[in-house]
């Protein structure tokens, strides 16, 4: 591209226990790779849902997850075991997206379908608990008294535990990549979900999410959370993003409160 595509689609939603702002921008990518879904009251009990999905090769996987993941979470919703709910929902997505490929026996069809990274956040227990599930490198970062706390981990092939799984499954990591991918977990990319007789947790490319929980209340408590694709994190560290967003929130307090999506837009502009 000769210039970044700065056009944005933004929205603000408010639920019983949170305000959510979202914005998406194509930037320097050849196509719009990212998709998202935001529900401030997913289950009529005040549970908020945020999902960010980042495709490669084709936008199909991210769009499929954005359209369907929250329904899987809601179908399986059990406030007593959100870890299990999220794990099964990610497994459902990986299985169901495979079903959208017209000829799954054709390697070219499988390749063209591509895949995506995914991070999903649930705010539950009357806004007091955050549960985050992720595969790949869409990152979730919280601010506690201005200090960044990462609630997800970027799944890179050269991480010791990821490399160990890949090599045990007969794969290899070269220049930080699994074949042509720079992530070691994701939805789709079935050519790398091998050996097929292994469970997902042990395949070269795994769809099994890593799940973390955090209490919102505390000393200090969580002030806000940012979920973004790697287009942001390649340009800004977790702490830099927290500093940026926190500064904008403080500026807006004198103006009657923030339009959160506007802060998202300004953050993306700072990354182009």
Image: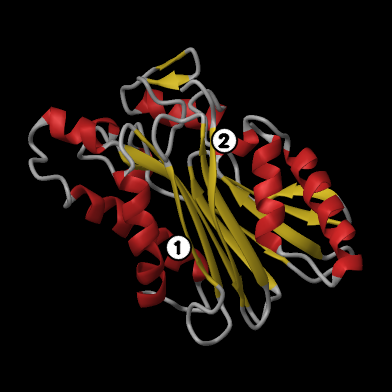
The residue at which mark 2 appears reads as: 231
Q: Earlier in the sequence, mark 2 or mark 1?
A: 1
Q: Helix or strand or loop: what does disc 1 sit on?
A: helix
Residue 92 sits above or below residue 17 on the image: above
Question: Which residue sits at x=85%, y=49%?
Answer: 147
Residue appearing at x 37%, y 48% in the figure: 62
Query: Which residue is denoted by mark 1 in the rendering?
Result: 86
Give the quarter of the image for residue 89: bottom left
Q: Nearer the viewer, mark 2 or mark 1?
A: 2
For residue 72, which numbered disc appears in the image?
none
Task: Name the residue rendered at 85%, 72% in the picture.
Answer: 256
Does dot 2 land on a helix, a strand or a loop?
A: helix
Could you say which quadrant of the image residue 121 lies in?
A: bottom right
Between the residue at mark 2 and the residue at mark 1, the CA separation in whole angstroms equals: 24 Å
Q: Nearer the viewer, residue 20 or 266?
A: 266
Q: Is residue 84 above or below residue 4?
A: below
Q: Position of residue 105 (x, y in %)?
A: 7, 36
Please identify the residue farthest to the top as the structure is shown: 175
């Amino acid at each position: 591209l000769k210039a970044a595509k700065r056009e944005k689609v933004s929205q603000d939603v408010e639920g019983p226990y949170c305000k959510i702002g979202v914005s998406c921008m194509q930037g320097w990518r050849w196509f719009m790779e990212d998709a998202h879904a935001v529900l401030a009251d997913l289950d009529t009990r005040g549970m908020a849902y945020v999902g960010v999905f980042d495709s490669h090769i084709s936008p199909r996987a991210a769009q499929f997850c954005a359209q369907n993941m929250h329904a899987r979470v809601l179908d399986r919703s059990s406030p007593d075991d959100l870890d299990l709910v999220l794990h099964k929902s990610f497994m459902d997505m990986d299985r169901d997206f495979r079903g959208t490929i017209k000829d799954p026996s054709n390697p070219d069809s499988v390749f063209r379908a591509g895949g995506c990274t995914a991070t999903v956040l649930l705010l539950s227990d009357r806004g007091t608990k955050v549960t985050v599930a992720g595969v790949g490198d869409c990152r979730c970062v919280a601010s506690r008294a201005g200090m960044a706390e990462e609630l997800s981990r970027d799944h890179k092939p050269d991480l010791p535990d990821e490399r160990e799984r890949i090599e045990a499954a007969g794969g290899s990591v070269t220049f930080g990549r699994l074949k042509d991918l720079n992530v070691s977990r994701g939805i789709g990319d079935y050519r790398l979900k091998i050996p097929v007789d292994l469970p997902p947790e042990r395949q070269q490319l795994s769809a099994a999410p890593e799940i973390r929980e955090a209490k919102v209340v505390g000393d200090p408590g969580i002030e806000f959370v940012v979920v973004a694709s790697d287009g942001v994190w390649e340009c800004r560290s977790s702490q830099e993003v927290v500093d940026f967003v926190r500064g904008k929130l403080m500026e807006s307090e004198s103006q009657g409160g923030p339009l959160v999506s506007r802060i998202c837009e300004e953050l993306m502009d700072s990354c182009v």
